[in-house]
Image (cartoon, helix red, strand yellow):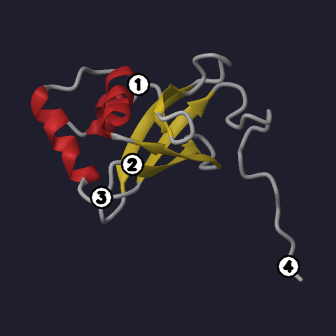
Amino acid sequence: MTASQRLSGKSFKCSEEEEDHLERYFKKSELIPCIVQEASTNEVLMLAYMNRESMAKTLETGYTWFYSRSRQTLWNKGATSGHTQKVISMYADCDDDTLLVKVVQTGAACHTGSHSCFYKEIARN
């Protein structure tokens, strides 16, 4: 069973072997970029960073956890706002150094109240 299949509507506890397996994603850096997409539309909602612990918590709980670079602490998306992200599937890129997480977004993904953090179009000259 793949991690995506296990995440689909369910949470699971990472075994020690699975947690050790997470190391492959953090060979180049302690933090890796994580692109978050709305599962039903593929709309890009946000970009955040995960460390090994936040990735393990995401896999364990079925909800997104990130590492806040400004606060230097773990951050459970929606814990205070209620704007949660239920994880449907997770993917690694070809180099295992970037993640794509498909979610069901409740409320706004952006701290500004926008559904997506990517709402400021840059006009061409």
Secondary element under disc 4, as helix, strand or loop, is: loop
Q: In terms of sequence position, does the residue under pointer 1 or pointer 4 come before the other?
A: 1
Q: Position of residue 98 (x, y in %)?
A: 40, 56
Residue located beneath label 3 in the image: 96
The span from disc 1 to disc 4 (Cα, nearest Å) is 39 Å
Say which amino acid is labelled 4. Arg
Q: Which one is earlier in the sequence, the residue at label 2 or at label 3?
A: 2
Name the front one of labels 2 and 3.
Answer: 2
Determine crowd level at label 3: few under 14, some 14-19, many 20+ residues with C-alpha closer than 10 A: some
Quarter holding residue 8: top left
Determine contact: label 1, label 4, CB under 8 Å: no
Residue behind mark 1: 62
Q: Residue furthest left?
A: 17
Q: Nearer the viewer, mark 4 or mark 2?
A: 2
Disc 3 residue type? Answer: Asp
Label number found at residue 31: 2
Q: Label 2 to label 1, Cα distance in Å?
A: 20 Å
For the point 45% across and 34% down, the residue is 88
Q: Quadrant of the N terminus?
A: top left
Residue beneath disc 4 = 124
